[in-house]
Amino acid sequence: MTDALDPAAMREQYRSTPLHEADLPAEPMEQFVHWFKDAAAGHLHEPNAMIVSTATAEGRPSSRTVLLKHFDDRGFVFYTNYTSRKGRELDANPYVSLLFPWHPLARQVIVNGTVTRVGRDETAAYFRTRPHGSQLGAWASAQSSVIASRTELLQRYEELAARHPAGEQIPVPPEWGGYRVTPETVEFWQGHENRLHDRLRYVRTAEEPSGWRVERLSP
């Protein structure tokens, strides 16, 4: 380990425009739209990539990167196998955290909320937009289950490809579908020099006309 890199010596000084409460819209989704457009315009690799953190009923956490596939005033939608680890954990514990790590912009968005499954019609509509190979992959992989080898996975895929050639409509796997995250808090994090970052968090409340209040957190 003598030639290992020292992570404690890795530092970067963030320099960006301050984020003020007065600059924020009344609702978090409008602010998310602004920052999401900035991330896309900045040519970030997969700006819709987010870290999804779940936990078991006993509180044991797990995290993984998932792609955001839709968002609107109702929340954030992603798709997965319901029998996967995250699917099983969400069935047992509906609380979830999302993190959008837009490091080149020195920004993060952190969402905490609860999930519900999207309707099968919505799932089917999205599934039909996926490339043919991705549709086959959803059938081939029993996500998070133990398999003997990659060869086993590829053989299953090839069997499905022979059964469903390109151009043929593939049904949605019954154990595959979407989750919608309804946010309870949405934090916008903007990095600044000397680690004096801006952290403005929307909190859902019935006390404000917009349904949200904004609070500043110490970095």
Image (cartoon, rainbow, N blue to C red):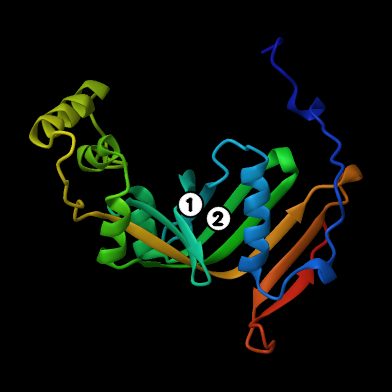
Residue contact at pointers 1 and 2, CB within 8 angstroms: yes
Quarter holding residue 185: bottom right
Secondary structure under tag 1 reads: loop
Q: Amino acid at mark 1?
A: Leu
Name above or below for residue 26 compared with residue 153. below
Q: Which image quarter holds the C terminus?
A: bottom right
Q: Which residue is mark 1?
A: 68
Residue shown at 38% from the left, 57% from the top: 89
Residue 193 in picture, x, y percent from top left: 89, 43
- The tag on residue 206 is none
Mark 1 surroundings within 10 Å by alpha-carbon count, few (fewer than 14), some (14 through 19), many (20 or more): some
Taking 138 as reference, is 25 above or below it?
below
Residue for badge 2:
98
Q: Residue at x 31, y 63 (%)?
A: 122
> x%, y% of residue 148?
22, 26
Q: CA distance from mark 1 to mark 2?
A: 10 Å
In front: 94, or 127? Answer: 127
Determine the secondary structure under disc 2. Answer: strand
Q: Amino acid at mark 2?
A: Leu
Packing grade of label 2 (10 A; few <14, some 14-19, many >=20) is many
Front in this rendered view, residue 81 or 70: 70
Q: Position of residue 200 (x, y in %)?
A: 76, 64
Specify which label sits upstream in the sequence, 1 or 2: 1
The answer to whether 123 appears left or right of 43 in the picture is left
Marks 1, 2: nearer the viewer: 1
Q: Furthest-left residue in view?
A: 163
Quarter in which the N terminus is drawn: top right
Residue 166 falls left or right of residue 91: left
Left or right: 18, with 36 as reference point: right
